[in-house]
Image: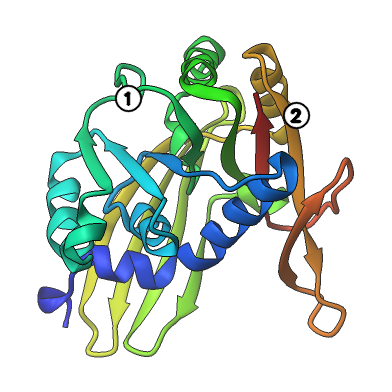
Amino acid sequence: MADKADINVLYEQSVQCVESEIDFVDETFQQLRGRKAKLLREDFCGTANTSCEWIRRRKTNKAISVDLNNDVLKWGRQHKVGKLNKEQKKRITLINDNVLDVKTGKIDTALAMNFSYWIFEDRPTMIKYFKKIHKTLVDDGIFFLDAFGGYEAYQEMKERTEHDKFTYVWDQASYNPVTGHCQCYIHFKFKDGSKINKAFSYAWRLWSLPELTEMLTEAGFKATVYWEGTDEDTDEGNGIFEPSTEGEADAGWIAYIVAEK
């Protein structure tokens, strides 16, 4: 089964929920600014799946999708953008470039999701990136990011999630407490015993929320953490993220950071 599997499809089924992500971006921007965002830039866009969801929401929406990996952009152009109708395709632009160098003109909102921006492992580079986004946003623009943490985030461990036809394995292979550097992988295992090892590889710094919000502030933003609420019946996350200055010391958590210009 592994030899017939498409890792980009597996990734989307395992990791992404672009509908809820765009719901959060769209609703939060409206709440904070009293208007709808129109032009969205998705950095580290991968297959541009999130951008395509943005395009489908309204005929006034436009998207710019930026990624350094041209192969994954080609896949997205064929399998994601290719499924948009003729009119929708005119409103999305895919750019193969480094987010530190790309110039796209003024935008309403920018996204750096799935922790992809953690590829910047030192403060000067991260702040440089944040400042570039700040400069690119319109006067009332908003930058949306996500982050993860919890005491298990610092452990070398594997977490398995069962799906109908495969098992998703999140592998925190190594963590250096001196530098904060972590090496993570995604593996996929199938019911016939076949597997795809290291389908995706991530070399990141494990940043904390205070570090990120302080750097965003230094770059000129007003940064607010949106913490996920808890389902009273399951004691798990309820998918509702609200502004908060306090969080629970859970084994694992995911939060949004909303950075207002």
Q: Along the horizontal axis of the image, is 17 left or right of 217?
A: left
Kindly identify which residue carries mark 1: 104
Figure label count = 2
Disc number at residue 121?
Answer: none
Q: What's the CA distance linking mark 2 and mark 1?
A: 29 Å
Quadrant for the N terminus in the image: bottom left
List x then y, in percent, for residue 92.
27, 47
List x then y, in percent, for residue 221.
67, 21
Residue displayed at 21% across by 50% down: 90
Residue displayed at 56% across by 65% down: 20
* Depth order, front residue of 57/2: 57
List x then y, in percent, for residue 84.
23, 65
User: What amino acid is found at the position of numbered circle 2 in the picture?
Assistant: Pro
Secondary structure found at label 1: loop
Q: Is residue 135 visible?
A: yes
Which of the two labelled residues, at mark 2 and mark 1, occupies the earlier sequence position? Answer: 1
Residue displayed at 75% across by 73% down: 236
Task: Kindly indicate the quadrant of the structure image that contains residue 189.
Answer: bottom left
List x then y, in percent, for residue 81.
21, 58
Secondary structure found at label 2: helix
Disc number at residue 210?
Answer: 2
Q: Check whether the beta carbons of the residues at disc 2 and disc 1 lie within 8 A of each other.
A: no
